Amino acid sequence: MTNVLSVTGQLLLMLLPLALWCAWWLLCVDWKKAWPVLSAGGWVSVLLLMLVVALAWSRIFPRPSFNFWWQLGGVTAWTLVALFCGWLQGKLGWAPPAISFEPPAHADHHHHGHGHAHH
């Protein structure tokens, strides 16, 4: 029984990065906005980023059996999983909640909260 729990724990630990990756791309990215950007040329930036990440990965962990092409394959796989999550989000009609980073508009412009006394 302990062996089964150990193997299950190891498997879950191995799947954790994939689960977090999918959660991000499914729940945090608004693909209704991302697809038009990608189709309007944003894919070029994604492709260049993929190449840079694979090149950096191949230099950080240089191994004879793992050359640049292996790392590029891995980066491509992760990118395809992200794109699949975008497709799935569209098919299921999901969308992350809209979050505005703009400060709220004030209705009363005379009292702007700076502590100025009116005479």
Image: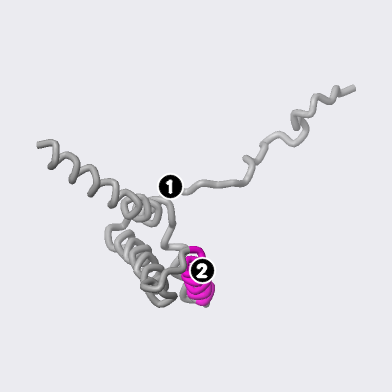
Kindly identify the residue that appears in the image at 32 percent across and 55 percent down.
18
Q: Which residue is mark 2?
A: 59
Residue 14 screen position, x and y as percent? 29, 51
Kindly identify the residue that appears in the image at 55 percent across and 47 percent down.
100
Residue 15 screen position, x and y as percent? 28, 52
Task: Looking at the image, tell me whether mark 2 or mark 1 is earlier in sequence order.
Answer: 2
- Looking at the rendered structure, the kind of residue marked 1 is Pro
Q: How is the image coloured?
A: one colour
Q: Label the magenta part by its dominant secondary structure.
A: helix
Q: Please state the extent of the stretch shown in magenta in the rendering.
A: 44-60
Taking the image as drawn, is residue 108 in sight? yes
Q: Does residue 92 sit above or below 1 in this rendering?
A: below
Nearest the eye: 41 or 79 = 79
- Looking at the rendered structure, the kind of residue marked 2 is Arg
Residue 66 screen position, x and y as percent? 38, 71
Left or right position of 34 against 109: left
Left or right position of 110 against 58: right
Kindly identify the residue that appears in the image at 85 percent across and 22 percent down.
117
Whole-Å distance between the Cαs marked 2 and 1? 39 Å
SS category of the residue bearing label 2:
helix
Residue 51 on the magenta segment:
yes
Foreground tag (2 vs 1)? 2
Residue 49 on the magenta segment:
yes
SS category of the residue bearing label 1:
loop
Q: Which residue is mark 1?
A: 97
